[in-house]
Structure formats: C-alpha cells, structure tokens
Image (cartoon, rainbow, N blue to C red):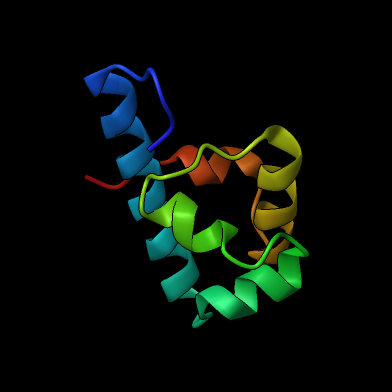
C-alpha cells in the first residue's frame, strides 16, 4: 500500500483493484496476459489489483487499451 494514505484512499485502491480484476477476468485474461498486452512492468497488474499500487494515467491508458475499454470504464465499480 502506498504510504501516507487515508483509510478512504486505501479502500478506493482496493475497490479499483477489485474492479480491474473483474474486468480482466471477464475478458479471460491472466495477469500475465494483461501485462504483455498493455506493455507494463511485470508485477504492476497484480500490485494494482491488490491495492498495493496506484497507477498513473499513462499506465491506466495502456491497461484500458489492452482490455479494449475506455479509461472511464476502469472506474465504473460494480457493487
């Protein structure tokens, strides 16, 4: 988990990560598939999904493109 985050921010990262995992799973992709397709660092997807890392806008754009989504869809959380 990134340092100096509030509980609310930590919860948001966990929610985002859970949503990313759902979107990836819905496309039948493994973390390794998404890393390869997005061209991001090897452990980045797993760390984002676990709420351990906050991705920057360029990384989000690569991930969204690899999932064939708009960036905004990464933030459409299903409750």
Examine the image and state in which quarter residue 61 appears: top right
Residue lying farthest to the front in this orientation: 3
Left or right: residue 32 versus residue 57 is left
Viewer-closest of 45 and 69:
45
Q: Would residue 46 appear left or right of 79 to someone viewing this image?
A: right
Query: Residue 63, percent across and down?
Result: 66, 56
Q: Position of residue 24 (x, y in %)?
A: 49, 68
Left or right for 41, reference 2: right
User: In the image, is residue 1 above or below residue 49?
Assistant: above
| Relative vertical location of residue 76 with respect to residue 19 in this rendering, above or below | above
Residue at (47%, 38%) from the top-left corner?
75
Quadrant of the snapshot with the N terminus: top left
Quarter of the image containing the C terminus?
Answer: top left
Q: Is the residue 30 above or below the residue 45 in the image? A: below
Q: At 64% from the left edge and 42% from the top edge, which residue is drawn?
A: 71
| Residue nearer the viewer, 25 or 2 | 2
């Amino acid at each position: 988990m990134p340092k100096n985050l509030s509980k609310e921010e930590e919860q948001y990262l966990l929610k985002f990560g859970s949503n990313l995992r759902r979107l990836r799973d819905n496309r039948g992709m493994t973390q390794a598939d998404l890393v390869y397709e997005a061209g991001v660092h090897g452990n980045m997807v797993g760390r984002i999904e676990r709420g351990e890392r906050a991705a920057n806008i360029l990384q989000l754009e690569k991930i969204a493109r690899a999932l064939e989504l708009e960036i905004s869809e990464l933030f459409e959380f299903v409750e």
